[in-house]
Amino acid sequence: SPVVRMLLGESVGLDRERRYNRRVTPGCGNLMLHREVFERVGRFDPAWAHRGEDTDLWLRILDAGDEGWFTPTAVVHHVIPPERLEPTFLRRLSGVMVEGMAEDEHRTWGRWYPAVWLARVGQAAVLLWPRWLWAKLRRDADGVLGATCRLEIARLYLRNGWRLLTTRRTRDEHHTTPGHVSWPKSHCEEPTT
């Protein structure tokens, strides 16, 4: 499944050289940077240790005026232990993958975020559920696993996004509610009204 391959670090769907941007960002499974880049923008921020440290670094690199490219001819072979191919691990990895996504989009879209959240609801209802159902009807185990992981990402995103929509936040809040994602204070912005 392309979703499972993406969860395991593959750049799925990129078949030609392509410049990375704010929407398509490099993962760190095969990232090569010159030392001077780290000297200019800093290293990986440990505050993002569970998810997003690669995206945070990439956005700082972009803000510094540098660019990066995906190159399909640079091939890396990853050894993936068998337990990382188990459905339980992949569903848990889906949960890690979604950490901070709603918060990132909330900061990016500001007052337009409710429309983005509703679009994500539509995406889950119109695209993701039917894909899962179609894979189930075809008895496509890989397709069901990929669709299940993608639905888990959507479910957690929508839950976290709903909390953002219904709770007023300030820069100094730090949430520790079980199952709730908090984000590093250094990356928060004041809420817009």
Image (tube, rainbow, N blue to C red):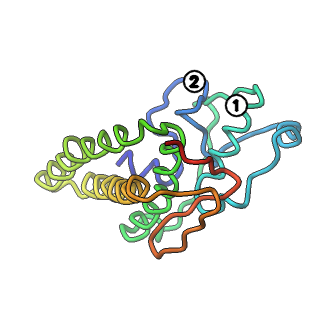
Give the side of residue 100 with respect to residue 2, left or right.
right
Give the side of residue 128 with respect to residue 193, left or right.
left
Residue in the foreground of this view, choosing between 193 and 101: 193
Q: Amino acid at mark 2?
A: Arg
Give the side of residue 122 with respect to residue 170, left or right.
left
Q: Amino acid at mark 1?
A: Leu
Rendered view: 172 above or below 165 = below
Residue displayed at 67% across by 58% down = 185
Q: Position of residue 159 (x, y in %)?
A: 36, 59
Callout 2 environment at 10 Å: few (<14), some (14 to 19), or many (20+)?
A: few
Q: Position of residue 32 (x, y in %)?
A: 74, 40
The image's mark for residue 18 is: 2
Residue displayed at 63% across by 51% down = 188
The image's mark for residue 62 is: 1
- Residue at the extreme left: 137
Residue displayed at 55% across by 69% down = 175
Q: What is the count of numbered marks?
A: 2
- The secondary structure type at the circle numbered 1 is helix
